[in-house]
Image (tube, rainbow, N blue to C red):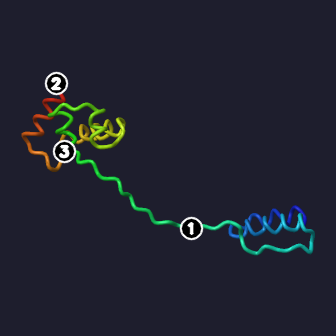
Amino acid sequence: MNNSQRSKQKKSPGRETEAFVTCITQLNDGARGSRIDEPLVFDTTYRIKWTESWVDLSELAKLRWIKGLSYDELALHYGRTRNAISNYCQNIRRKDFVLPGLADVEREKIKWAYQS
């Protein structure tokens, strides 16, 4: 098999691995060597399930701005990193403290605490 034949075989998308394995086998074992017809690579898909619990943003807002917990204390409470807590708080501020499960009175207290 010359170089032009090898390059033609490698360009077909589904048979690239087979052509490569065949070329290597023929180079190692000669023209009469064993031929591998199956590719040496396989593709498998595994199902996964995300089991991490969700952080209740309204509870986080209450703990942060009404009770005055720090990012480090909140990280320990929720079992997350300090950066994750910081991102959650930033999302709460972007939503202008409008969260499900948060009463209007609590929202006003949180906004007042955030501004001061």
Residue 13 in the image, given as x and y percentages of width and height: 69, 66
Q: Which residue is mark 2?
A: 116
Residue found 81% across the figure and 69% down from its top: 22
Q: Which residue is mark 1?
A: 44
Q: Which residue is mark 3?
A: 58
The label nearer to you, 1 versus 2, is 1
> Quadrant of residue 96 in the image?
top left
Disc 3 to disc 1, C-alpha distance: 41 Å
- Asked if residue 28 lies left or right of residue 63, the reply is right
- Asked if residue 114 lies left or right of residue 74, the reply is left
> Quadrant of residue 29 in the image?
bottom right
Q: Residues within 10 Å of mark 3 (few under 14, many from 20)?
A: some
Quarter of the image with the N terminus in it: bottom right
- Kindly check if marks 3 and 2 are in contact, taking CB atoms under 8 A apart as contact: no
Q: Tag 2, which secondary structure?
A: loop
Type of amino acid under label 3: Ser
- Kindly check if marks 1 and 2 are in contact, taking CB atoms under 8 A apart as contact: no
55 relative to 20, above or below:
above
Q: Residues within 10 Å of mark 2 (few under 14, many from 20)?
A: few
